Amino acid sequence: KAGVTQTPRYLIKTRGQQVTLSCSPISGHRSVSWYQQTPGQGLQFLFEYFSETQRNKGNFPGRFSGRQFSNSRSEMNVSTLELGDSALYLCASSFEGEWGTEAFFGQGTRLTVV
Amino acid sequence: GQQVMQIPQYQHVQEGEDFTTYCNSSTTLSNIQWYKQRPGGHPVFLIQLVKSGEVKKQKRLTFQFGEAKKNSSLHITATQTTDVGTYFCAGTTSGTYKYIFGTGTRLKVLA
């Protein structure tokens, strides 16, 4: 069974540009969540999608947006990039497993803004 | 807003010693999850606790959810070098799938 796939793995962008990150969940998982991980702020929740609907949103500015497609694949977009957006962006897909609502994380996309 | 703190931030132990990390939330949680992240890796789900006072065990790992559902702990018995990594708790309040991650505890095991 394939895991959560995130593309690209690494990305370098310039301030002011916009970027789109992609996440393919595990087959059958309908919930996809996005997180930003930085050394200073740790893991912070961005948003969560289920069946193409955003169910929950974290405390990030409107420059951060996302969407989910009918096949559960999700994309995250960041517009007008700032230096502080440099981070590891992780997505996770979830299902109800033996130990609870199990979230499986992808390898992440490391975004560097210069 | 909701905050989840973990202590200690770092812990170095000799192989074979026990290790405990504590997670405290500023608000009552619906459930709490625990993850392990190896250096350079991504978080890996360990367990979810839902009930007040719940205790679950996975081999050498024991997870506990406080009676008030505002704190939790992860205890590792007889640590091994494979236990190295950062352990995160993540909690959510009732009715949401918005998980707030703790600050993490970085564990180093000295052989």
Image (cartoon, coloured by chain):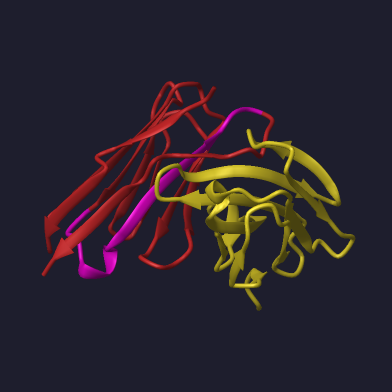
When asked about the image quadrant of residue A98, the answer is bottom right
Residue at screen point 63% across, 33% down: A59
Residue at screen point 44% across, 67% down: B41
Position above or below: B68 against A6:
above
Q: Which residues are magenta?
A: B77-94
Q: Residue furthest bottom?
A: A1
The color chain B is rendered in: red
Residue at screen point 40% across, 57% down: B36
Q: Nearer the viewer, residue A18 or B77?
A: A18
Q: Nearer the viewer, residue B7 or A95?
A: B7
* Residue A66: in magenta span: no
Identify the image quadrant of the C terminus of chain A.
bottom right
Chain assigned yellow: A
Residue at screen point 24% across, 40% down: B8
When asked about the image quadrant of residue B38, the answer is bottom left
* Residue B92: in magenta span: yes
Position above or below: B104 against B17:
above
When asked about the image quadrant of residue A90, the answer is bottom right
Q: Is residue B15 left or right of residue B31?
A: left
